[in-house]
Every structure is written in C-alpha cells, then in structure tokens.
C-alpha cells in the first residue's frame, strides 16, 4: 500500500479518498479468469467477483469473490459496451491493468501498472513534453459536447507513460509532477501514510483510505455514539484472504498515541453494534502509536464487499456523531 501511495503526488485538504488494488493477485484468490480480449460474459464474471456482485449461482447459493478489489473508476467504461471506443481513445482498457492507485481529491489522478510503453499513447497529441491528451481544451474545461467513455464529464484527460506505468488525470500539472517524481507523495500524508504502512503489515491485496471530516448529520443512527469524544481523521480498509476465507482489516488514525489508546474500547463497542456485527466480527483490536487497527472476520458471503459500501456512505463504523 505504501508503495502505491508513493506513486502519486501528495494532496492535502479535506475529503481525500485513495483506492488501490493488486488486480492480478485478487483475480487469482477469487478463482476467476481475467479475459484477455473483449468478452462480455467473461468480463462480467471477472468484474463482479472483484466489486461485490454475485457472479454465479442463485438465491442463497450465489457466489461472491473472496477479496474485494474494485477496478479503477477511470477505466470503468472500458468494461462494458463502450469497450472499443474507450480503447480507441485511450490506447488501453482495464483488461490491461495489473494494479493501480487512484486518488480522488482536488487533483484526481490514477496510476496504472501493466504492459504500458511509448506505443500505448503514440496516437495521442502532446500538450507538454511527455504529456499527452485525450480530448482538447484547457484543464478541467467542461464541454458536454465532448463527453466520452474516458471522460464522462467532458473534461480533456492528460496522460503519460513512464517506466511501464501510466498516469491519467484532468490536471496537466499533476501528470507532470508524477513524471518528474514529486518531492512529496501520498505516502507522506500525515494520516494516510501511517495507515498504509499498517495495512502493508497485514498483507492486504486491496485498500481504500480516506481522510477528512467524518462527523455526520446523525442520519445513520446512534452506532457511533461511543466515538463522540474520540475523533479520528483518517481510516483505511484493507481486504485480503487467509486460508481461503475473506479477511478485513480496518485502521484508524488519531491525533496522538494517547487518543488512539483511549479509542480502542469505544471502537470495539461500535463494531459490536448489531448493524455492524451482522457483517463483521472482531478477531483483534489494538493501538499502536497513533493508530488503532481492527482485524476482522466476515459473517455473510458478501460481508467483505458490504464494508466498502459502508465506507462509501460513511455508515458505522466509519463516521463520527455530529456535535
């Protein structure tokens, strides 16, 4: 996880979201095949196994992937009916991606690893040395007449290949910084950097990390009340497998060591709340420096995927009660 975060320039501010996954390893664990060419049925099975949809079976016998490792958002449209158009525009599709890290923040950027070289982007015009563009116009200049499968909002997308990796972003400056090797990366983020290190120690296959304000309007209920006086400013969820069974790790970042130690039992209460316990069971929870890390087993066949939905909507155990 730390290595993935080190690939992208540091972004600070509120509401930062980072996703990263080793798609090759996740595919192997889930026991499916990644199609080499466009095959709608095979793509459905592969993608569904990664992002939490049942990919075979019916009713109570539906099959879910062991590991949650959703493909990158930037390439989603390459997995459906717009596959060919996406490939013609971008020079690649998600089927070419081995792993990725994707930052959703003021300067969105995705870095992909795979079989990328100078030929991948050879047909695209250059806007700056080494930086090519998919679409014309200034950075983040929306043109709804130029909506494409690569840019559903109508922005031109800047892209570049360096050392076999491919970066894509609506920001020319961000891609340039990536090419040059930024002075600071997301691995240096004060909350997400330590979380990534903790998840590395747990040998997770994929992760989603978020930093920002986790206080809510209280619409989710009272499950988070034990955390009223124990605010965290970052959280990371890691997905993996052990002995063929799903494994989920959640790590929280607090202001200091004392704050983390004081939050262990309140967090245990939150995980023991009925709406959380229907998906997750604590195997171990402990503080280490400014982090509290919970190691969890799953209850239902799709519980490992439900955790991603909980984080997305800031449901327990990923929100703080309103003050």
Image (tube, helix red, strand yellow):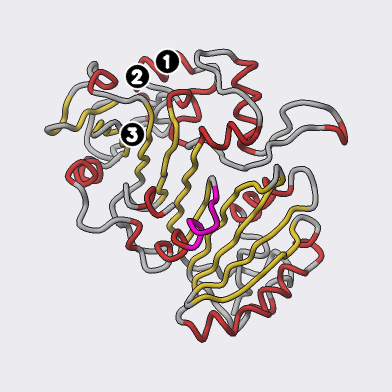
Q: Nearer the viewer, mark 1 or mark 3?
A: 1
Q: Are marks 1 and 2 in contact (CB under 8 Å)?
A: yes
Q: Quadrant of the C terminus?
A: bottom right
Return the mark for residue 319: none
- The residue labelled by disc 1 is 85
Residue at image x 24%, y 28%? 133
Q: What residue is shown at x 19% (from left), y 32% (from top)?
A: 131
Marks 1/3: CA–CA distance: 16 Å
Residue at the spot 37% in from the left edge and 68% down from the top edge? 190
Q: Label 2: which residue?
A: 89
Residue matched to label 3: 155
Residues under labels 1 and 2: Cα distance?
Answer: 6 Å
Q: For mark 3, give the secondary structure.
A: loop
Residue at the outermost left position: 129
Please provide percent x and percent y for residue 113: 37, 34
Asked if the residue under mark 2 is in contact with the one under mark 3, i.e. CB atoms within 8 Å, the reply is no
N-term-proximal mark, 3 vs 2: 2
At horizontal 33% and vertical 31% (from top left) the residue drawn is: 143
Range drawn in magenta: 198-204
Residue 78: image location, x then y, percent = 48, 23
Horizontally, residue 245 falls left or right of residue 69, namely right
Of helix, strand and loop, which one carries label 1?
helix
SS at mark 2 in the image: helix
Which image quarter: residue 92?
top left
Task: Compute the Cα span from label 3 to label 2.
Answer: 13 Å
Q: Residues within 10 Å of mark 2 (few under 14, many from 20)?
A: some
Which residue is most to the front? 243
Q: Is residue 103 above or below residue 273?
A: above
Q: Residues within 10 Å of mark 3 (few under 14, many from 20)?
A: many
Pinpoint residue 82: horizontal percent, then vertical percent: 49, 18
């Amino acid at each position: 996880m730390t290595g993935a975060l080190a690939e992208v320039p540091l972004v600070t501010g509120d509401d930062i979201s980072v996703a990263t996954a080793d798609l090759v390893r996740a595919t192997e664990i889930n026991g499916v095949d990644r199609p080499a060419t466009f095959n709608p049925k095979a793509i459905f099975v592969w993608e569904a196994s990664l992002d939490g949809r049942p990919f075979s079976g019916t009713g109570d016998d539906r099959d879910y992937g062991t590991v949650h490792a959703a493909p990158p958002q930037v390439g989603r449209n390459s997995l459906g009916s717009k596959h060919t158009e996406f490939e013609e525009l971008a020079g690649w599709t998600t089927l070419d991606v081995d792993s990725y890290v994707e930052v959703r923040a003021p300067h969105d950027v995705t870095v992909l690893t795979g079989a990328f070289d100078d030929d991948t982007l050879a047909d695209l015009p250059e806007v700056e040395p080494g930086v090519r563009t998919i679409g014309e116009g200034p950075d983040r200049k929306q043109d709804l007449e130029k909506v494409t499968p690569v840019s559903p909002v109508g922005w031109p997308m800047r892209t570049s290949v360096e050392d076999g990796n491919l970066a894509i972003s609506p920001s020319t400056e961000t891609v340039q910084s990536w090419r040059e090797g930024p002075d600071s990366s997301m691995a240096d983020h004060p909350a997400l950097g330590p979380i990534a290190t903790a998840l590395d120690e747990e040998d997770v296959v994929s992760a989603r990390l978020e930093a920002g304000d986790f206080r809510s309007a209280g619409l989710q209920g009272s499950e988070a009340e034990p955390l009223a006086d124990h605010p965290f400013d970052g959280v990371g969820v890691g997905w993996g497998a052990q002995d063929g069974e799903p494994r989920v790790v959640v790590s929280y970042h607090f202001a200091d060591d004392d704050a983390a130690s004081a939050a262990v039992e309140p967090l245990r209460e939150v995980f023991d709340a009925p709406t959380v316990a229907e998906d997750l069971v604590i195997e171990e929870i402990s503080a280490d420096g400014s982090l509290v890390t919970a190691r969890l087993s799953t209850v239902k066949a799709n519980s490992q995927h439900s955790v991603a939905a909980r984080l997305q909507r800031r449901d327990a155990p990923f929100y703080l009660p309103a003050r």
